[in-house]
């Protein structure tokens, strides 16, 4: 027996009349009578007793009816869930976010959850390089990272740029030059080889200015605490200061540098993206006014 025949038998059992059951199923009576006969022959039992045009279920028919109801109901649930998953209304979405913070991220999640409340969200926070590895080994599906991030196995969508700022405990002028910064002991975010660290080093190397790096820290809360304690100053994207800055710290614009931080979304090349992931990408494009399909 297949699922179609079970639906036939449910209609017969509930209508107790072949003609009425056939009408309910939008089919003619003879084929339905033939289906009932084939089911009884296949199972080797009588499923109904005929009293003129009225049918009564045998004990075997009652048993089949109960099981058929459960099976058809379970099948419909699976079919509906598969359809909802395909449309992204159900499923799982795992997203990694860089420790340097993306202030808009909670709003993006709130908007996504409002549209897809049945999607289970898993959020992982770490540095960009580690998030890239998690994407590559499929631990997470999407990663919000600071670019550039050299990895040939990843696709990326550039989201936006923002300026770096100089943060220290001294309340001085609103602006500061790279030459002045070169005299300060610095605590840099993240570690060598990653986006922000590389951008800062490249800018000072190009300007032929030294960097007095006394420490590196990938945890922004700890980095801000170190700066707040007076151990050193730092250069960070503006949004990081908005998220983690302390009341005794001051942000100053860097006047003579093209120091810009880029935020991007990454995913694995040549790998099927789940519908929830594609919906999340579409949401970001809509909110940020991005028209292009993304970059490789």
Image: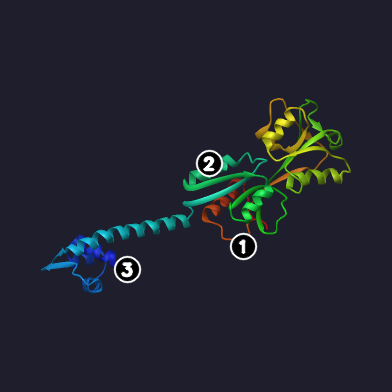
Q: For mark 3, does the 10 Å Cα neighbourhood hold few (<14), some (14 to 19), or many (20 or more) residues? A: few
Q: Residue furthest right?
A: 208
Image: 274 above or below 238: below
Kind of element beneath mark 2 = helix
Residue 20 spot, x, y in % from top left: 19, 64
Q: Do the numbered discs 2 and 3 sit on residues whose CB atoms are within 8 Å?
A: no
CA gap, disc 2 and disc 1: 29 Å
* Residue drawn at (47%, 57%) of the image: 86
* Residue drawn at (56%, 49%) of the image: 94
Kind of element beneath mark 3 = loop
Nearer-the-camera pick, 178 or 66: 66
Q: Quadrant of residue 57?
A: bottom left
Instruction: Look at mark 1 in the image and give the residue it sits on.
Output: 270
Q: Mark yes or no: residue 283 visible.
A: no
* Residue drawn at (73%, 54%) of the image: 150
Instruction: Look at mark 3 in the image and give the residue it sits on.
Output: 2
């Amino acid at each position: 027996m297949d699922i179609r025949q079970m639906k036939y038998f449910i209609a017969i059992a509930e209508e107790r009349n072949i003609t009425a059951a056939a009408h309910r199923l939008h089919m003619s009576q003879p084929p339905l009578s033939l289906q009932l006969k084939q089911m009884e022959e296949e199972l080797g039992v009588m499923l109904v007793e005929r009293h003129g045009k009225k049918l009564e279920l045998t004990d075997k028919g009652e048993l089949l009816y109960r099981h058929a109801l459960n099976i058809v109901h379970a099948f419909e649930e699976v079919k509906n869930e598969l359809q909802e998953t395909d449309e992204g209304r159900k499923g799982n979405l795992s997203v990694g976010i860089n420790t340097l913070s993306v202030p808009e991220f909670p709003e993006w999640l709130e908007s996504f959850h409002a549209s897809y409340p049945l999607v289970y969200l898993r959020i992982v926070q770490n540095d960009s390089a580690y998030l890239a590895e998690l994407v590559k080994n499929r631990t997470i599906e999407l990663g919000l990272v600071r670019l550039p991030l050299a990895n040939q196995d990843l696709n990326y969508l550039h989201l936006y740029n923002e300026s770096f700022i100089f943060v220290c405990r001294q309340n001085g002028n609103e602006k500061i030059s790279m030459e002045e910064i070169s005299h300060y002991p610095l605590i840099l975010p993240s570690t060598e080889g990653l986006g922000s660290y590389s951008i800062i080093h490249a800018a000072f190397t190009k300007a032929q200015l030294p960097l007095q790096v006394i420490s590196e820290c990938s945890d922004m809360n700890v980095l801000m605490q170190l700066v707040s304690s007076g151990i050193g100053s730092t250069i960070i994207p503006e949004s990081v200061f908005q998220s983690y800055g302390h009341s005794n710290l001051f942000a100053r614009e860097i006047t003579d540098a093209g120091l810009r931080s880029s935020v991007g979304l990454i995913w694995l090349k040549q790998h099927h993206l789940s519908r929830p992931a594609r919906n999340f990408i579409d949401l970001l494009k809509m909110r940020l006014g991005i028209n292009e399909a993304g970059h490789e």
